[in-house]
Image: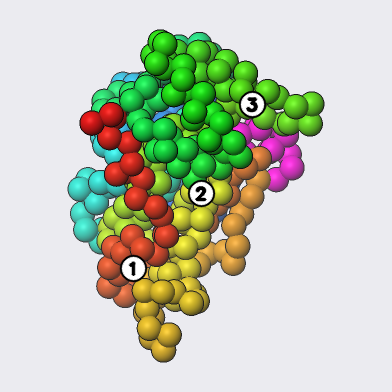
């Protein structure tokens, strides 16, 4: 029992103190983990949510696609004494690692972790010079592959949609000219080019490269597609009364979660994939009417929390709905960049 070991599971392994879980108290309130429950943490990271859930008495199945997160979590696995199973996997495949309809709760913390950003060799941040990589799993197409080989029109669409970049054409054409002379290899090379063609104005709150780096990271890791598939997998994996809690950090992610819960709670209106007179069965009851955001105190202490939004739902006993990607209204970005083929 978590309450009987003279301290938290995190304390038993000396942390994880370097990572501050965003909206932790709000996540626990929405998830309501208790002894005897099995909760799946689809985004283990540094183990912040998992540690807190274990301390509430629940068993945890934790996933992360990043092998460094799995390696870093082994001390927590040992401290949990059989109550934590840690698996390297994308969270879109969470239903492969839990009994169908057998989970009491699922929590997803979407996006890049602070640990990944802090590691220059991972290439996630333009503030730390490193290889232009950005792959969470360390496998597949890298950001350098996309920048150096994707068609210019594809880069424009990636930067525009995934980064909400205001000058995608100017940046994409500058990349095209530069890569003919020398392929991009480092984060600094790309950031310097972007800053040259779209210089920072005094009123700008963010670096000119911020949106392009966000777009490349989301594209390389198929983050929006992964999130959409994870929501469907979560629906199939929760038992009646089970809770799904999702924390997002930018508008594209939140829009997907909002549309999913609207569709699955029967509150979607004007949906083009359903007849107007169709009365929809609800797979979820909403925990909150709107997204929960961080308090001023938390946002002040942890700047990453400022953009965070939490949405949650409670699974009904209705059968899982069809995994219909059209409810998200996402473009087919997976077919865009063929890496020059």
Q: Main secondary structure of the magenta part?
A: helix
Disc with the residue nearer the chain's start (2 vs 1):
1
Q: Is residue 324 magenta?
A: no
**304 and 55: which is toward the camera:** 304
- Numbered disc total: 3
Q: Position of residue 291 (x, y in %)?
A: 59, 57
Is residue 99 found left or right of 182 in the rendered image?
left
Q: Position of residue 151 (x, y in %)?
A: 36, 33
Quarter of the image that includes the C terminus: top left
Which residue is painted at 28% across and 68% down in the image? 322
Q: Farthest bottom residue?
A: 277
Look at the numbered disc 2 and give the secondary structure of its residue: helix
CB-based contact (under 8 Å), mark 2 and mark 3: no
Q: Position of residue 310 (x, y in %)?
A: 55, 52
Label at residue 198: 3
**Relative to 22, residue 7 above or below:** above
**Relative to 218, residue 309 above or below:** below
Which residue is painted at 43% across and 69% down in the image? 263
User: Which region of the structure is painted magenta?
Assistant: 295-305
**Relative to 209, residue 284 above or below:** below
- Cα gap from disc 2 to disc 3, whole angstroms: 23 Å
Look at the numbered disc 3 and give the secondary structure of its residue: loop
Mark 3 vs mark 1: in front:
3
Assess disc 1: are there few (<14), some (14-19) or many (≥20) residues with their C-alpha within 10 Å of its C-alpha: some
């Amino acid at each position: 029992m978590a309450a009987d070991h003279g301290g938290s599971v995190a304390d038993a392994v000396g942390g994880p103190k370097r990572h501050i879980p965003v909206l932790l108290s709000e996540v626990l309130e929405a998830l309501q983990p208790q002894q005897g429950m099995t909760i799946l943490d689809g985004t283990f990271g540094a183990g912040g949510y998992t540690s807190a859930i274990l301390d509430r008495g629940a068993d945890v199945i934790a996933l992360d696609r990043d092998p460094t997160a799995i390696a870093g979590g082994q001390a927590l696995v040992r401290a949990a004494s059989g109550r934590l199973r840690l698996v390297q996997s994308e969270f879109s495949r969470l239903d492969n690692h839990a009994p169908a309809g057998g989970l009491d709760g699922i929590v997803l913390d979407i996006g890049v972790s602070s640990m990944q950003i802090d590691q220059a060799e991972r290439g996630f941040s333009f503030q730390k010079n490193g290889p232009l990589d950005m792959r969470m799993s360390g496998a597949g197409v890298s950001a350098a592959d996309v920048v150096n080989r994707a068609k210019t029109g594809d880069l424009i669409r990636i930067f525009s949609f995934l980064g909400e970049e205001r000058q995608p054409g100017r940046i994409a054409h500058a990349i095209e000219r530069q890569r003919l002379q020398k392929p991009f290899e480092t984060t600094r090379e790309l950031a310097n080019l972007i800053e040259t063609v779209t210089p920072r104005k005094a009123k700008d709150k963010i670096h000119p490269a911020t949106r392009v780096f966000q777009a490349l990271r989301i594209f390389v890791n198929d983050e929006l597609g992964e999130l959409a598939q994870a929501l469907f997998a979560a629906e199939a994996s929760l038992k009646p009364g089970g809770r799904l809690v999702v924390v997002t950090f930018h508008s594209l992610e939140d829009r997907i979660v909002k549309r999913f819960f609207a569709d699955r709670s029967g509150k979607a209106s004007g949906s083009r994939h359903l007849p107007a007179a169709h009365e929809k069965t609800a797979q979820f009851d909403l925990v909150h009417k709107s997204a929960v955001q961080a308090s001023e105190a938390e946002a002040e202490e942890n700047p990453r929390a400022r953009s965070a939004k939490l949405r949650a739902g409670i699974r009904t006993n209705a059968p899982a709905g069809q995994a219909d990607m059209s409810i998200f209204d996402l473009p087919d970005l997976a077919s865009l960049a063929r890496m020059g083929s």
